[in-house]
Amino acid sequence: MTKLYSWNVNGARSVYRKGFVDWLEARRPDVLFLQEVRAEHAQVPGPMAHPPGYHVWWNPSKTKRGYAGTALYSRVEPLSVKFGTGVKKYDDEGRTIVAEYDEYWAVGCYFPNGGNDHGRVPFKLGFYAAFLRMCERLRKTKPVIFCGDVNTAHHPIDLARPKANENTTGFLPEERAWLDKFEAKGYVDAFRAFHPDEPEQYTWWSQRMRARDRNVGWRIDYFWVTREWMDHVEDCFHEPEVTGSDHCPIGLVVKG
């Protein structure tokens, strides 16, 4: 089996201090994508920057320091690694890493937040479009697995307070419609494929009002798999007990 993980760490240096290396050594993922690293590779402590047994790639934001950024840890060196969707204004924020393996493309993504005032919603929707175009280009040669913080809860079951958040970015109709488009193109939300009706399954919790203790959360972190590859997927799961970030790690198990 191959284990892929995704985790929005809400700051690489912060999650390092909260036990990231112990978690990595305990889980030993074959492929791990991180989001919101908020640091350059040289700024990360050595045990996290160069863990034994891993090839590591870092894609920090070029627009401002301490913002966004993604990373990839892989036990097997990919055939190729590239950064970005091909659209500079999105790629300068370090939001996408693409790794090619023998049988599939693995993509780690950190979708923009629309902002409390919705000011970045157009930017976010543009990113959705660029990201889908990129995935469709990749899919012409191999199946695609993409994962990360998509910053949108798809259905009412995917957040604790759907009615209260109908006008909140992350649950706006136009944001959710893009996840409908991914489904229509043949991408499968792997967690829901294995846990179709399970409520209260969240991956992010506000740091206010003890939201995590009360499990008042959102499911905004995903693995999406092209439909033609789903028969290779064994499971998709969350690790809400891991508390190094306001997001929890999520995992995908595939055959081989």
Image (spheres, grey):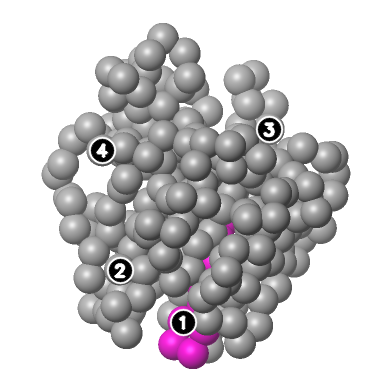
Which residue is disc 2 drawn over?
253
Q: CA distance from mark 4 to mark 3?
A: 27 Å
Residue found at x 44% / y 71%: 30
For label 2, the crowd category at 10 Å Cα-Cα, with few meaning under 14, some 14 to 19 and many 20 or more, is some
Of circles 1 and 3, the one toward us is 1
Marks 1 and 4 in Cβ contact (< 8 Å): no
Residue 85 in which image quadrant = bottom right
Query: Residue 197 has which mark?
Result: none
Residue 137 at x, y = what percent? 59, 77
Which residue is disc 4 drawn over?
201
Say whether residue 237 is left or right of residue 11: left
Residue 139 at x, y = what percent? 50, 79
Camera-side residue of 208 and 185: 208
Sequence-first tag of 1 and 4: 1
Sequence-first tag of 4 and 3: 3
Which residue is disc 1 drawn over?
104
Q: CA distance from mark 2 to mark 1?
A: 14 Å
Residue 59 in which image quadrant = bottom right
* Secondary element at image label 4: loop
| Quadrant the N terminus occupies | bottom left
Three-letter amino acid code at disc 3? Answer: Arg
* Secondary element at image label 3: loop
For label 1, the crowd category at 10 Å Cα-Cα, with few meaning under 14, some 14 to 19 and many 20 or more, is some
Sequence-first tag of 1 and 3: 1
Which residue is disc 3 drawn over?
120
